[in-house]
Amino acid sequence: MLRRLTRSRPVQVIQAYGSAQGGNYAAGLAFNAFLAMFPLILGILAIVGLVINDPAVQTNVYNGVVSVFPSDAHQQILAALDGVKHNAGILGIVSIAGLLWSGTSLFASMEFALTKIFGTSQRDTLRQRLMGLVMVLVFIAAVLLTVTANSAAALSPGAGILGALLGAVVLIALVIIIYRWVPNRTFSLGDIWQGAVVAGVLIEVFSLLFPLYAKLSKGFGTYGQQFALFFLLATWLSFMSQFILIGAVFNKIRLGTPKADGIFASSEAKSRAHKEPHQAIEEQRRKTAG
């Protein structure tokens, strides 16, 4: 019985994730996501403000974008961003620039983490930024699609269930695109969907249970709203990052080493082979000594 359990796919994935030090890469990815989060939000709102002139529609999009995050953090995020929708001009330009830089950096970090999981090489810097730019556009489209789906679902009976289902579909589709396009070497579209479903279901279930976790940890609010917001978002992003990498480990166990090209993939000759930190330091030491 125990032997059969240890050979089951879930246990294999968990063991492989731990052996690959996936938690360390997820922590780095979560940190980059935290740094990129507010520039991404500000950039999306700035673009909406430039494209849409209807204040009511802007408010719906504004609230919808915030609704992507944990419900317990909505009030603090709205307060932190309250002045943004009343400012335009240079702030809008800076916000869009921040969106592009932070967003492309986030997906470059994601490529690094997935490269470590898959054991492949990274793109050169230019192609990496081009991939990041495409993924920023995909992310914006996914957020706006989620907002639209939730708004439409709110008009129907059983809005809560329908909204959750639509959100899960959009989320799984986004993870499929991440697995297919972000790594320099990846798997074919028909092969990656199972890992994407695993990651998407884990993220959706955790998002539904997160308010309970927030209530259990509400004591952190005694140290101030800003600290509570930081703690909630850091925890949420940490689990999101881990679930994305767990889905990637699931695909790696099933499919082995990826051979297909991601979007804007570098050839083997131009790819950046990953070096362990001690190898890079030793190489530099030898160059200096020479």
Image (spheres, helix red, strand yellow):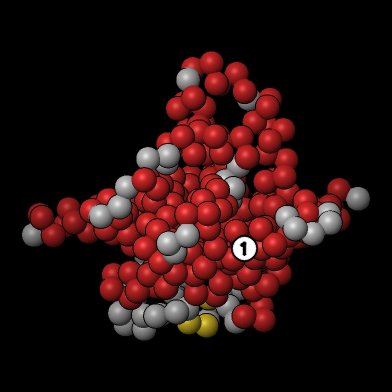
Residue at (91%, 50%) from the top-left corner?
Answer: 1
Q: Is residue 171 visible?
A: no
Count all numbered tags in the image, as a single digit. Answer: 1
Residue drawn at 23 percent across, 53 percent down: 90
Q: Is residue 73 above or below residue 91?
A: above
Q: Residue at x 39, y 80 (%)?
A: 264
In the drawing, does residue 81 fall left or right of residue 206? left
201 and 87: which one is in front? 87
Identify residue for label 1.
Answer: 148
Q: Where does the image place residue 173, in percent across and percent down from the top left?
A: 63, 69
* Above or below, comparing residue 233 to residue 87 in the picture: above
Question: Residue 88, can we see it?
Answer: yes
- The residue most toward the right is 1
Q: Quadrant of residue 256?
A: bottom right
In front of the other: 278 or 252: 252
For the residue carrying disc 1, how many other residues have a C-alpha within 10 Å: few (<14), some (14-19), or many (20+)?
Answer: some
Query: Does 248 appear above or below 187?
Result: above
Q: Nearer the viewer, residue 22 or 189?
A: 189
* Quarter in which the C terminus is drawn: bottom left
Q: Residue furthest top?
A: 222
Percent across and percent down for residue 56 are 53, 54
| Residue at (35, 74) in percent of width and height | 130
Drawn side of residue 138 relative to residue 200, left or right: left
Would residue 137 appear left or right of 5 to someone viewing this image? Answer: left
Residue 246: percent from left, percent from top? 62, 56
Q: Is residue 210 above or below residue 268?
A: above
Q: Amino acid at mark 1?
A: Thr
- Which type of secondary structure does the marked residue at label 1 adopt? helix
Q: Position of residue 64 (x, y in %)?
A: 57, 52
